[in-house]
């Protein structure tokens, strides 16, 4: 339902639970499930992994912490490439994304 909503209205900040900087979570109100995402813009969101949250914060759960940290790193690399104009964000699309992105290092 949430992914459909993002597709219809965009990745509006109010639809996410803030975590760290651009790292957000889709809160599933009826359960403790969390899906971690990285908001690039209102139109673009990286959808990562998640799971059942049993701790106060994701940092306290090794599995969720790993998912969140990995997505945060990839998102930060992508944002640095956008800021340096190596990746272009135009008309709600990203262009010139290097593959594999996850092997890049942040500067």
Image: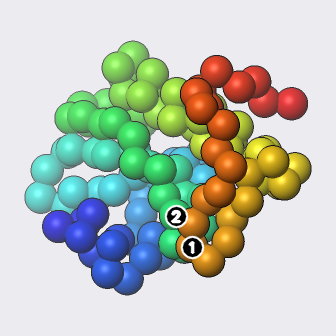
Residue 43 in view, yes or no:
yes
Task: State the colouring used for the structure image.
Answer: rainbow
Quadrant into which the C terminus falls = top right
Residue neighbourhood size for the residue with mark 1, other residues' Cα within 10 Å, grouped as few (<14), some (14–19), many (≥20): few
50 sits to left or right of 71: left
Q: Tell me where residue 86 appears, x and y as whole percent.
A: 81, 48
Q: Nearer the viewer, residue 57 or 7?
A: 7
Q: Which mark is residue 44?
A: 2
Which residue is depicted at the point 40% across and 48% down?
47
Position in image of residue 80 (x %, y %): 79, 45
Q: Residues within 10 Å of mark 2 (few under 14, many from 20)?
A: some
- Image: 79 above or below 4: above
**Residue for badge 1:** 92
Quarter of the image for the N terminus: give it. bottom left
Q: Is residue 32 left or right of residue 69?
A: left
Residue appearing at x 61%, y 59% in the figure: 94
Q: Is label 1 in contact with label 2 (beta carbons under 8 Å)?
A: yes
Q: Is residue 6 left or right of residue 39?
A: left
Does 2 sit above or below residue 51? Answer: below
Q: Residue at x 54, y 58 (%)?
A: 39
- Mark sitting earlier along the chain (1/2): 2
Total of numbered circles in the picture?
A: 2
Q: Quadrant of residue 56?
A: top left
The residue lying furthest to the left in this view is 30
Q: Quadrant of residue 72?
A: top right
Left or right for 65, reference 100? left
Image quadrant of residue 99? top right
Local secondary structure at mark 1? loop
Secondary element at tag 2:
loop
Disc 1/disc 2 C-alpha distance (Å): 7 Å
* Mark seen at residue 71: none
Q: Residue at x 47, y 50 (%)?
A: 46
């Amino acid at each position: 339902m949430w992914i459909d909503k993002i597709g219809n209205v965009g990745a509006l900040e109010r639809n996410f639970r803030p975590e760290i900087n651009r790292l957000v979570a889709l809160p599933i109100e009826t359960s403790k499930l969390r899906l971690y995402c990285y908001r690039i813009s209102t139109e673009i969101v990286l959808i990562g992994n998640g799971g059942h949250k049993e701790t106060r914060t994701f940092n306290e759960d090794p599995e969720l912490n790993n998912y969140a940290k990995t997505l945060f790193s990839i998102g930060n690399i992508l944002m640095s490439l956008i800021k340096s104009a190596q990746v272009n964000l135009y008309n709600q699309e990203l262009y010139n994304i290097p593959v594999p992105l996850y092997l890049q290092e942040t500067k």
